[in-house]
Image (spheres, rainbow, N blue to C red):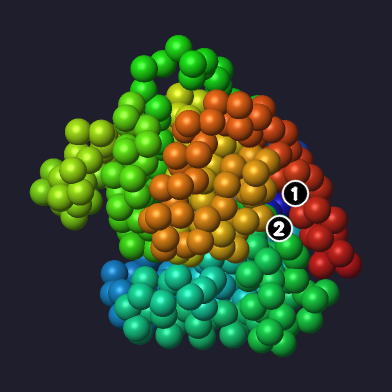
Amino acid sequence: MRVALVHRFFWRAGAVPAVIREWADHLDAAGHEVVVFASDVRSEESTGRRAYVPVRLGKIKAFDLAGLRFAAGLAAVLQRRRRARPDVLLAVDSTAYFGAWLAGKRLRVPTIMAFQGWVYSPGKRAMYPRTVAWMYKLSVHFCARWAPKIACISREIYGGLRALGTPGDRLWLAPNCVDLGRWKAEKGDAHGRAKRRVLYVGRFSPEKGLRFLLEALPAVAARVPELRALLVGGDEAEDGEYHEMARRLGVAERVVFGGVVPRDALPKVYADADVLAVPSLAEGHPLAPLECLACGTPVVASDIPGLNETIEDGVNGLLVPPGNPGALAEALGRILRDDEARGRMSRAARSSVERFSWQDRVREFEALGTSLRA
């Protein structure tokens, strides 16, 4: 098949562009021709098996006009390339889907919308400006009504679309995947280490709940004097909000702000940690827990959709109520102090994510593409 992948960004850092790149790599490995439509690609970098098609992105954020500019450009580019039209199009950008759907109707190309997040999640109420949230909600309702197929990375998204009236036969429950061949690292012996290491990997944005982790650290340190925390994923200056919070809470000497770490370096970062903390208020189906578990490190996470579909409480980690620093501190302290429980969870970690296989997901996609084209 010739598969078109659509998102505003392909090479930018972040979880969603990383998912798009994984889709491209694994579809390519399965023998499919891949065409990437994004704002940050260059056509001269195309190869015989993969084409990169740049689409202009707007700059105005109100009502997501930047995304609408991208959607209009996408429709125009697809129309110009009609002689090389794809067999199926996978869009991972709900605003861009307006353009994908229009071009798909004109060119008779089946389109799949893949939601990586859910704007209606309670934890995302304050995440977007009002006008942007309005546009995202409009795009959700449009997809619910018109998309031939919708990929849902979590049960929350699946259930939300069903509540909007989308028939189940148009929904595909397709959580994010992890490449076990890539995400692996030698797990060190924690018994011989002087420190106990808590890891955080993610953006420094409110819905990720980093403040709850910092608020939990004093109580953890009281139980685990050798505690150290490494915070990765945000490039904050020393006078930033979270640096100041660490100083105010008296844990600054225990916290290392690691900045943005290249993805190729993350396996060792995951493996060197004793536990990954994911204190989010809202998630789709995040990559960090999948990748960390593949590297043999247990996870303490908020008991919310997307996370409780990866973390099995007491098996490969622990689940805690979201926004509760006390419960988070208790769970982190329990894992850090209990070598037997931590070792058991670590041994179960990698096998627990084998069900999130890229090979299985690509086979599902192939069958789906065939049925949509029939």
Q: Do the residues bearing badges 2 and 1 touch, measured as CB atoms within 8 Å?
A: yes
Q: Residue at x 20, y 33 (%)?
A: 253
Amino acid type, residue under disc 1 in the picture = Arg
Does residue 179 appear to the left or right of 217 in the view shown?
A: right
Q: Nearer the viewer, residue 203 or 359?
A: 203
Give the farthest residue toward the front: 223
Give how far across and how far down residue 39 sits, in percent: 41, 57
Q: Residue at x 72, y 87 (%)?
A: 165
Q: Nearer the viewer, residue 178 or 369?
A: 178
> Which residue is the site of mark 1?
361
Q: Residues within 10 Å of mark 1 (few under 14, many from 20)?
A: some
Does residue 319 appear to the left or right of 358 in the view shown?
A: left
Give how far across and how far down residue 128 sits, in percent: 36, 74
Give the farthest residue toward the left: 239
Note whether residue 146 is visible. no
Does residue 168 appear to the left or right of 301 in the view shown?
A: right
Quadrant (top left/top right/bottom left/bottom right) for the C terminus:
bottom right
Give how far across and how far down residue 238 sits, in percent: 13, 43
Callout 1 secondary element:
helix
Q: Residue at x 44, y 82 (%)?
A: 135
Give how far across and how far down residue 166 sits, in percent: 73, 82
User: What's the CA distance linking mark 2 and mark 1?
Assistant: 7 Å
Q: Is residue 370 above or below residue 26?
A: below
Q: Residues within 10 Å of mark 2 (few under 14, many from 20)?
A: many
> Which residue is the site of mark 2?
174
Q: Is residue 140 above or below residue 38?
A: below
Callout 2 secondary element:
loop
Query: Tag 1 or tag 2, which sits nearer the N-term?
Result: 2
- Snapshot quadrant of residue 114: bottom right
Note whether residue 124 is visible. yes
